[in-house]
Image (tube, rainbow, N blue to C red):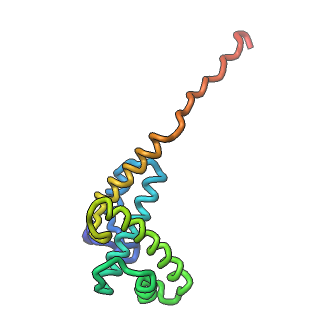
Amino acid sequence: MPDAAAPDHGQGPLSISELQQLEATLLPALERHHLRLLAHGLRTLQQVQRCTAEPHLPKQAAIEQWLLAQSDLSQEPDFCRQLAQQLDSAGRQLEQLALQRGVAPLELDLEALIDWARQQADQRLATAPPSTPQTPPAAPPAGL
């Protein structure tokens, strides 16, 4: 039986238990989606770092090289280039979050990402204009 904490590399860098942990946040859909993307980026960048043995956040060129070395992606250079750009962008966002937490970007964990996503949801909801309750339709006149 596969270990639920180990990533299924055919499916992505997040394990089933990590995905369940992200879903269990019950955040609004927008924040939960962003959280999944950021967590995916974090885990992928951690894998790249382990393979490149760089002490810092991998640069876009290193990310692209690593992607091209993956058997499923080796024949997709355009996709790898675009994905490397997206992962580089995620890395910059992780750097900002890491600065706030006083850690290196790739030392962040899912709990830190979940805390951040909750703060984002709270901010968005606090600044959302109040909704007005809808008035129920008037009852039709009697006898109709």
Residue at (41% x, 59% y) in the render:
35
**x%, y% of residue 32?**
43, 54
Res 111 quadrant in image: bottom left
Residue at (32% x, 67% y) in the render:
15
Looking at the picture, does residue 88 appear above or below residue 142?
A: below
Say which quadrant the C terminus sits in.
top right
User: Which residue is the extreme one toward the top?
Assistant: 142
Looking at the picture, does residue 110 appear above or below residue 51?
A: above
Res 94 quadrant in image: bottom left
From the viewer's perspective, tell me whether residue 76 is left or right of residue 13.
right
Q: Is residue 75 visible?
A: yes
Q: Is residue 70 visible?
A: no
Q: How many marks?
A: 0
**x%, y% of residue 65?**
43, 88
Residue at (56% x, 84% y) in the render:
78
Q: Nearer the viewer, residue 26 or 128?
A: 128
Say which quadrant the N terminus sits in.
bottom left
Residue at (41% x, 61% y) in the render:
36
